[in-house]
Amino acid sequence: MDDKKMDDKKIFKILQHWFPALEQRDIPKKKHRKRFVEFLNWIEAEKFGGRFRGYLMKIDRMQFHENEIERCAIFHEYAVDSLGIQTQIRERVKPLFDHYEVHKDVIGRYYNVQDQVYDVVFEEILKQARQHDHELLLIYAEDYYWLIVPNHEYKIEKFCKCFNKQFHDEDVSIEHYALFDCSRST
């Protein structure tokens, strides 16, 4: 298929394949498919059993604990303890903030503690996702979003490639999040 003639329904169809509940939703009309806001409206969380659950979660760039883990439909499906994940995140980031507070005069302008904090958040989400044979995708737009998808490497790669092409003009991108196991000196 020619890059210029990309099937702009593809990302919606892949998501419907991954999440059959989305099959009930009409794919946006052709003239709206390249608008990220239309994508957000299409995949929006729905109320289920008195709680909101969704496939795409937003994370606040300044408040790491505002990450919508409790809304994740995949975590609901597998009865994952979202409060337990949040507790684990808080326990892991506390030493980062403590260290930063002690040394911020020296490292303050050279060190972005938020980057490390978000790595902790995403590591904990991914750790839970992998226990259920899923992976983590991150979307970078005006806001940051995350979603858990089945671990089908080829489909993930195809989805990310199509997504990046589809929303390139709006400066929106997606990546398959990976853990980097770096040796730490002691």
Image (spheres, grey):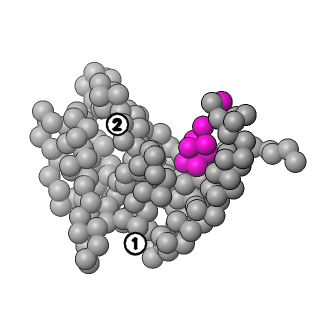
Q: Residues within 10 Å of mark 1 (few under 14, many from 20)?
A: some
Instruction: In this rendered view, identify the residue nearer to me: 145 or 24.
Output: 145
**Residue 11, image x and y in percent?**
30, 43
Kindly check if marks 1 and 2 are in contact, taking CB atoms under 8 A apart as contact.
no
Residue 180 as seen in the image, left or right of residue 141: right
Quadrant housing residue 112: top right
Helix, strand or loop status at disc 2? loop
Magenta stretch, main secondary structure, is: helix
Residue carrying label 1: 76
**Residue 161, image x and y in percent?**
41, 34
Q: Specify the segment rendered in magenta.
A: 110-118
**Residue 141, image x and y in percent?**
36, 36
Q: Residues within 10 Å of mark 2 (few under 14, many from 20)?
A: few
For image coordinates 54% across by 52% down, the residue present is 122
For image coordinates 32% across by 23% down, the residue present is 3
Q: Is residue 151 above or below residue 88?
A: above
Is residue 29 visible from the viewing direction of this image? yes
Q: Is residue 111 magenta?
A: yes
**Residue 7, image x and y in percent?**
25, 34
